Amino acid sequence: MTDQLDLTDLRILDLLQHDARVTTKEIADKLGLTITPTSIRIRRLEETGYIRRYVAILDKEKIGKKQIAFTMVQLLEHSQAALTAFEQASVRFREVMESYRLTGKFDFILKVAVRDLQEYNNFLTDRIASQPNIGAVQTSFVLWEGKVETAYPLDFPAPPSKSTSRRSLTDTRKPAKKKR
């Protein structure tokens, strides 16, 4: 899907995913464009789903969600209906920050944010264990966060090789005329 994006689109996405509060004018200035074409590009990126939403990333410690757990769930039955039922239930749990269906021994992994172990125990017994078709649950608690990143690495096109062009991608000067 990124084959439909040009270098300017990728640069806009990169700027926005690192700071969603950056203004259209600031983006335009950084890219050497005017506001109108920059605004049109941003709107197109939103409308085509490249930009899904804008968010503020909160400090979990300050809002009292200090305990992060990864809960792996194995279902007893693996029919499409059973998998879909658990998917739909898990995304409605307010404690679940992320939910993924997996390959391997476990069918799902849930990233769960809670205040403490007591709140996690309530989540486990009241929400997970009350679901039909639960075969096994295994939880790992986060002790240390080595890296938490929300920005995806984007694949920018390689600059032209020096043998084909000596100008950079951001060089806006007209090429020099050849002398005869």
Image (spheres, rainbow, N blue to C red):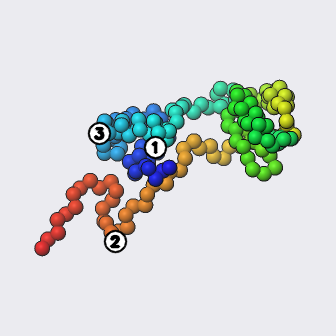
Name the residue type under label 3. Thr
Disc 1 element:
helix
Q: Position of residue 99 (x, y in %)?
A: 70, 38
Q: Position of residue 122 (x, y in %)?
A: 82, 26
- Name the N-terminal-most of marks 3 and 1: 1
Q: Which disc, if any, is residue 163?
A: 2
Q: Which disc, if any, is residue 13?
A: 1
Q: Position of residue 9 (x, y in %)?
A: 41, 46
**Residue in front for this viewpoint, 65 or 71:** 71
Q: Position of residue 67 (x, y in %)?
A: 74, 33
Spatial CA distance of label 3 from label 1 is 17 Å
Callout 3: 10 Å neighbours few (<14), some, many (20+)? Answer: some
The residue shown at (68%, 37%) is 98
Name the quadrant containing residue 131.
top right
The residue shown at (38%, 48%) is 8
Name the residue type under label 1. Leu
**Residue in front for this viewpoint, 12 or 26:** 12
The residue shown at (83%, 26%) is 126
In the image, taking residue 154 as reference, residue 129 lies left or right, namely right
- Name the N-terminal-most of marks 1 and 2: 1
Spatial CA distance of label 2 from label 3 is 32 Å
- Tags 1 and 2 touching, CB below 8 Å: no
- Name the N-terminal-most of marks 2 and 3: 3
Q: Which disc, if any, is residue 34?
A: 3
Disc 2 element:
loop
- Tags 3 and 1 touching, CB below 8 Å: no
